[in-house]
């Protein structure tokens, strides 16, 4: 690691720690006002953000990025407004800090409360999507945390413009600008410095990106990690699914936005309904521009599919490609998801309530849905305003990570002159 990067990152860590200490003393109204100001600053900076994004898009196109990756990177007026609205929504959420989530009095007469507290300093490493800059900043500040952001090189100029506006908005309301810092360099040495913890100033690392990024973070991090793994999402059409509902959900789950982690990558369909229903679903998907890769049973029903390989069941396409498998029953569908899924988001389409309950209870994923598109795997749709990612592990937080999930807790104990005998 070059010394200048090392020094810069250490300074950012110290500044974040100082900012986190300041945030811890702010009341809910101050944080709310600061985030609303940040949202308005993003709106005011829309011309600068669009100009920066145009630079990123031009460079990404020249490098031959796929249409799906370009879609993840692209900003327009509507997406900037949606980004600002997301910050506003986070601002108006109840403040999690100081919330008492348990309270009791044991036999010794002490009054004991478990109270939410900030985590401290978050290190966020992400790829491509520049709107994560605003989402992560808003969620961390709402939870009383400072955040150091290291965005992907593809969206560097876009993220820089967003972070600049966000910080300016915070400052207008007296919040520390260094509550939200973006690493001003695309040198990968900065990632290594963050994974080392910046001299103890980072309390949690959150990676959001592809397999290689997650693998590196999990292997090299010297601080706790909250992973956002790939979205190998499944839609399972049960034999008792409503045909029209199944058709609409499958197309939406795959094609609404193919480049997001909640996009379906595999369709499982019961053998009992496949002969009648799969040709209709396939026709809908192909009309929407989706390439289909099926197993032998699927291709026997729809003969213009490509053949699916073993690797297809393990692939997050993030593109207009869908793998399809005919399964014998609910147990076979659940077995497939257990073997190939990433514990992200999986959906069952059925009018059979007992079958739905078995699926919802038996599929070990962060989000399980019944008669709904996997594209609802989104913190905004959960009422969190925005999200910092979809956590696919089982410790600390799971599913969409909003402000409440970026807190810890401590115990507040009140006595009446208690001494222990």
Image (spheres, rainbow, N blue to C red):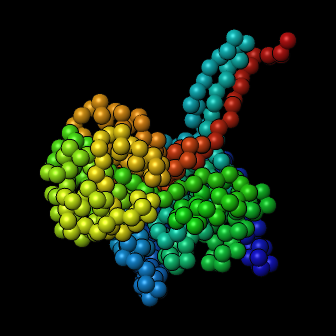
Q: Nearer the viewer, residue 119 or 32?
A: 119
Q: Quick check: can you spot residue 380? A: no
Position of 169 relative to 372 (above/below): below
Query: Which residue is painted at 79% across and 61% down in the image?
Result: 199
Query: Which residue is painted at 34% across and 33% down in the image?
Result: 357
Residue 179 in picture, x, y percent from top left? 63, 60
Position of 199 relative to 274 (above/below): below
Task: Place residue 73 in its image quadrant.
Answer: bottom left
Task: Place residue 124 in its image quadrant.
Answer: bottom right
Quadrant where the C terminus sits is top right
Task: Place residue 413 in its image quadrant.
Answer: top right
Please state the total of marks drawn on the protein image.
Answer: 0
Residue 46 in picture, x, y percent from top left? 42, 74
Q: Furthest residue to the right?
A: 421
Quadrant where the N terminus sits is bottom right
- The answer to whether residue 245 is left or right of residue 37 is left
Q: Nearer the viewer, residue 367 or 176?
A: 367
Query: Which residue is painted at 44% across and 57% down in the image?
Result: 231
Position of 56 relative to 73 (above/below): below
- The answer to whether residue 418 is left or right of residue 36 is right
Position of 314 relative to 27 (above/below): below
Residue 82 in picture, x, y percent from top left? 37, 63
Q: Furthest residue to the bottom?
A: 62
Query: Which residue is painted at 26% across and 43% down in the image?
Result: 238
Residue 378 in picture, x, y percent from top left? 41, 53
Q: Quick check: can you spot residue 365? A: yes
């Amino acid at each position: 690691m070059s010394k200048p990067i090392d020094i810069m990152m250490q300074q950012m860590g110290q500044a974040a720690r100082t900012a986190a200490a300041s945030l811890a003393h702010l009341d809910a109204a101050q944080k709310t006002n600061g985030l609303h100001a940040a949202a308005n600053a993003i709106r005011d900076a829309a011309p600068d953000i669009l100009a920066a994004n145009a630079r990123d898009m031009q460079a990404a196109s020249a490098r031959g990025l796929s249409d799906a990756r370009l879609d993840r990177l692209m900003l327009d007026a509507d997406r900037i407004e949606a980004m600002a609205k997301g910050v506003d929504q986070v601002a108006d959420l109840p403040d999690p800090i100081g919330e008492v989530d348990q309270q009791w009095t044991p036999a010794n007469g002490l009054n004991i409360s478990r109270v939410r507290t900030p985590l401290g300093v978050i290190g966020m490493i992400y790829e491509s999507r520049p709107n994560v800059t605003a989402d992560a900043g808003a969620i961390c500040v709402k939870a009383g945390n400072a955040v150091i952001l290291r965005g992907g090189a593809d969206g560097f100029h876009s993220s820089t413009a967003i972070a600049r506006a966000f910080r300016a908005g915070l400052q207008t309301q007296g919040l520390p600008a260094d509550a939200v810092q973006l690493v001003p360099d695309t040198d990968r040495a900065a990632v290594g410095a963050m994974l080392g913890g910046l001299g103890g100033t980072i309390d949690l690392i959150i990676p959001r990106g592809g397999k290689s990024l997650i693998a590196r973070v999990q292997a090299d991090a010297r601080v706790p990690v909250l992973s956002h793994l790939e979205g190998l999402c499944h839609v399972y059409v049960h034999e008792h699914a409503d045909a029209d509902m199944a058709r609409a959900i499958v197309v939406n789950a795959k094609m609404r936005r193919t480049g997001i982690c909640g996009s379906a990558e595999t369709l499982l369909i019961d053998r009992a309904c496949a002969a009648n229903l799969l040709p209709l679903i396939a026709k809908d998907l192909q009309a929407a521009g989706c390439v289909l890769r099926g197993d032998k049973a699927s291709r026997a029903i729809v003969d213009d599919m490509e053949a699916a390989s073993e690797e297809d069941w393990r692939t997050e396409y993030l593109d207009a490609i869908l793998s399809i498998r005919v399964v014998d029953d609910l147990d076979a569908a659940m077995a497939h998801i257990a073997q190939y899924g990433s514990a992200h988001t999986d959906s069952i389409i059925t009018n059979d309530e007992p079958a739905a309950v078995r699926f919802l209870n038996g599929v070990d994923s962060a989000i399980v849905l019944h008669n709904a598109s996997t594209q609802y795997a989104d913190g905004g749709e959960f009422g969190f305003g925005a999200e910092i990612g979809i956590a696919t592990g089982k410790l600390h937080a799971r599913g969409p990570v909003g402000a409440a999930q970026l807190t810890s807790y401590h115990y507040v104990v009140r006595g009446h002159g208690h001494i222990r005998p």
